[in-house]
Amino acid sequence: MKLNRAGLRGMELVKSTGKVMIQGGGTFGTFMSVASGYAVFKVTKEKKLNKCENVVEEFSNSEKLSNLLTLKHFEQFKDIDEAIKATTNCISGKLPKKLKKLLNEHVLGENEQLAVSDSKLATIIKDKLEISCIANTPIQQLMSCIRTQAESLIPNLEDMDNEAMQLALAHG
């Protein structure tokens, strides 16, 4: 049995296709990688998210989504090369040092669950950092909403920089 940083048994990775299903009664945060960096958000209205039947429909506009999430931290990539390397590492099952540091610094709650869009990456985070993760279809839908509205959720995220990074990652 693995113990998390607080010495408590970690919650299991949740894979379901219904509602988001936050377990354990703790707090809930999300991690995602946008083209220009890593973002960690705190979900401020967990009950609303748990009750949601259609995540995309419910949070498709930036006002509703910004009422659900607050940005805890954004770590911008220094250049396109770093973005490509980080993406490649995550795809190949390796956690970049920058990501490890970010998650260790900004996911501190002993009862905190971290929503991750990719179940493989969620398993790696859980195994290597002992952070409880959730990855399911509604989480993927939530991440899609965050990704499409990143400019309104992440202050100072330059549209041109993000678009250039997206283009480089698509062709890198």
Image (cartoon, rainbow, N blue to C red):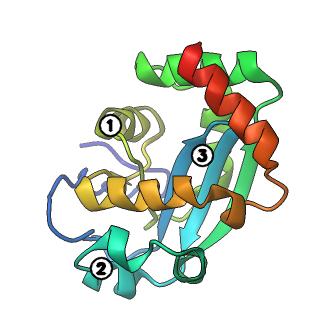
Residue 34 to residue 31: above or below: above
Residue 59 picture location, percent across and down: 44, 75
Is disc 1 surrounded by few (<14), some (14 to 19) or many (20+) residues within 10 Å? many
Label 3 sits on a secondary structure element that is helix
Name which residue lies at 54% across and 52% down. 147
Q: Answer with mark 2 or mark 1, whichever residue precedes in sequence.
A: 2
Residue 165 picture location, percent across and down: 70, 30
**Residue 103: assigned label:** 3
Q: Nearer the viewer, mark 2 or mark 1?
A: 2
Q: Quadrant of the C terminus?
A: top right
- Left or right side of 37 for 107: left
* Residue furthest left as drawn: 17
**Residue 50: assigned label:** 2
Q: Answer with mark 3 or mark 2, whichever residue precedes in sequence.
A: 2
Name which residue lies at 43% across and 38% down. 125
| Residue indicated by mark 1 | 123
Q: Amino acid at mark 3?
A: Leu
Residue 17 picture location, percent across and down: 14, 59
- Left or right side of 152 for 34: left
Is disc 2 surrounded by few (<14), some (14 to 19) or many (20+) residues within 10 Å? some
Quarter location, residue 34:
top right
Label 1 sits on a secondary structure element that is helix
Q: CA distance from mark 2 to mark 1?
A: 22 Å
